[in-house]
Image (cartoon, rainbow, N blue to C red):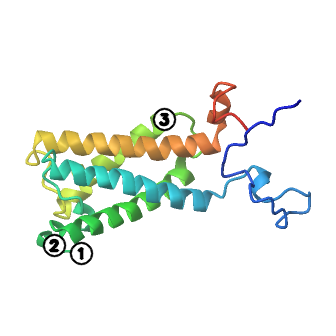
């Protein structure tokens, strides 16, 4: 008696059984093996913003950082509003939009780079741009020498993790990172 192998869900698999959307070579769009970069970056950026924006909110609530979660929305909203619950939500939404744009930019510039290191550098570059260059010049963030060590390190760590999340997700999807997984792992199974 032959045992059936379980099929894991993936972006490329078609579990509905509906093969009506097939291309000329007889394979469905989901089975062709190519992920749409635009929709992938949209969803990746949304979840990167949601996860790491929420973590920024928790860090602010726990007083690890002095910057409100909506620091990127500061030019458009008053600080008193950004300190409210709705301001937290606006901050997370703005961070999601920022993350979507950054994931699209990362895909255009670095989609062929494998491994997590370019994402790590990418997160550091965005931290340096926001907290070292653009933020202080637009009065969004205080100058680095006045911001405080705990805020600097907290924001740096969050941006490093955020960049690594975006970079490694794109590298895993669009390079041969999946082929480096062990043969029996869930990521390598089809």
Q: Is residue 90 visible?
A: yes
* Mark 1–mark 2 distance (CA, rounded to whole Å): 11 Å
Residue 81 image label: 2
Residue 76 image label: 1
Q: Are marks 1 and 3 in contact (CB under 8 Å)?
A: no
For label 2, the SS is helix
Nearer to me, 56 or 174:
56
* Mark 1–mark 3 distance (CA, rounded to whole Å): 34 Å
Q: Is residue 124 visible?
A: no
Count the numbered circles shown.
3
The answer to whether residue 72 is left or right of residue 45 is: left
Give the mark nearer the N terminus: 1 vs 2. 1
Which residue lies at the image location 85% right of the left edge and 63% below the top edge? 22
Which residue lies at the image location 26% right of the left edge and 51% below the top edge? 56
Q: The C terminus appears in which quarter of the rendering?
A: top right
Give the mark nearer the N terminus: 2 vs 3. 2
Nearer to me, 109 or 175:
175
Q: Residues within 10 Å of mark 1 (few under 14, many from 20)?
A: few
Q: The N terminus appears in which quarter of the rendering?
A: top right
For marks 1 and 2, give the one nearer the viewer: 2
Nearer to me, 185 or 36:
185
Residue 139 at x, y = what percent? Answer: 16, 63
The answer to whether residue 19 is left or right of residue 177 is: right
Q: Residues within 10 Å of mark 2 (few under 14, many from 20)?
A: some
Q: Residues within 10 Å of mark 3 (few under 14, many from 20)?
A: many
Q: Quadrant of residue 102?
A: bottom left
Q: Which residue is mark 3?
A: 116
């Amino acid at each position: 008696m032959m045992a059936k192998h379980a099929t894991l869900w993936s972006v490329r698999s078609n579990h509905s059984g509906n093969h009506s959307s097939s291309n000329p070579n007889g394979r469905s769009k989901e089975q062709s093996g190519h992920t749409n970069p635009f929709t992938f970056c949209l969803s990746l950026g949304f979840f990167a913003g949601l996860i790491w924006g929420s973590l920024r909110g928790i860090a602010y609530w726990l007083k690890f950082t002095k910057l409100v979660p909506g620091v990127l929305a500061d030019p458009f909203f008053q600080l008193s509003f950004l300190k409210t619950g709705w301001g937290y939500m606006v901050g997370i939404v703005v961070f999601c939009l920022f993350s979507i744009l950054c994931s699209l930019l990362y895909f255009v510039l670095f989609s062929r780079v494998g491994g997590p290191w370019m994402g790590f550098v990418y997160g550091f570059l965005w931290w340096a741009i926001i907290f070292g260059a653009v933020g202080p010049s637009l009065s969004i963030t205080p100058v680095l020498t006045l911001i405080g060590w705990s805020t600097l390190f907290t924001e740096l760590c969050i941006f490093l993790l955020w960049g690594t999340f975006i970079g490694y997700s794109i590298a895993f999807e669009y390079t041969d990172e999946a082929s480096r997984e062990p043969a029996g792992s869930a990521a390598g199974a089809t």
